[in-house]
Amino acid sequence: MSAPAITVAADLLSLREVGPWLHTWLRAAGEEVASLGAPMELGLQELCVNVVNHAYGEIDPGVDATIDLALERSEDGVTCVVRDRGNPAPVDLLDQADPTEAQVHGYGLMILRQLTETLRYERNGDENVWTLTFAVPAAV
């Protein structure tokens, strides 16, 4: 089951649209994925805030500053694809944060890695493409 994609403006206020869109899809997707609501919302919010602050933080005003999100249900989970046309993610931002050392950046991606089954980033032309897979818990 795929969800209708959503495009939001790349600003912190517009990110409030992501939660309702996600939960509407989760309700339609069925009971087995309902438990993914909180981790998926937290993960998508963390990633989108990173996009706003890092990808679009210092970008030319003429750039289409939007974030595209899409969801797809598979047998073993839910995949979220997040696309933006901001600056590429710097390699050091992609490194694993060390929670024992004080630092300014990297905790959002550390949280994402803990919430997701897989987290993948690629630069595709002028787009950043983030793919997050959330595993559906096994039935008891």
Image (cartoon, helix red, strand yellow):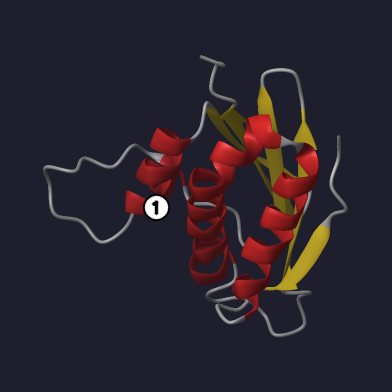
Q: In this rendering, is residue 17 above or below 70?
A: below
Q: In this rendering, is residue 39 above or below 104?
A: above
* x, y percent for residue 18: 66, 64
* x, y percent for residue 59: 62, 76
Outermost residue to the bottom: 61
* x, y percent for residue 65: 72, 74
At horizontal 54% and vertical 23% (from top left) the residue drawn is: 137
In the displayed structure, does residue 105 sit left or right of residue 15? left
At horizontal 37% and vertical 38% (from top left) the residue drawn is: 95
Q: In this rendering, is residue 128 above or below 95?
A: below
Q: State the residue in front, 73 or 54.
A: 73
Residue kind at label 1, given as amino acid type: Gly
In the picture, residue 91 is in which quadrant?
top left
Residue 134 visible in the shown view: yes
* Number of marks drawn: 1
* x, y percent for residue 22: 69, 55
In the picture, residue 96 is in which quadrant?
top left
Q: State the residue in front, 74 or 94.
A: 74
Q: State the residue in front, 40 or 85.
A: 40
Q: How crowded is mark 1: few (under 14 residues within 10 Å), some or many (20 or more)?
A: some
Q: State the residue in front, 57 or 2.
A: 2
* Residue at numbered disc 1: 108
Please state, as top left, top right, bottom left or bottom right, where the N terminus lies in the image: top right
In the displayed structure, does residue 94 sit left or right of residue 129? left
At horizontal 38% and vertical 44% (from top left) the residue drawn is: 111
Asked which secondary structure carries label 1, the reply is: helix
Residue 86 visible in the shown view: no
Q: In this rendering, is residue 27 above or below 50?
A: above
In the displayed structure, does residue 137 sit left or right of residue 84? left
In the picture, residue 66 is in which quadrant?
bottom right
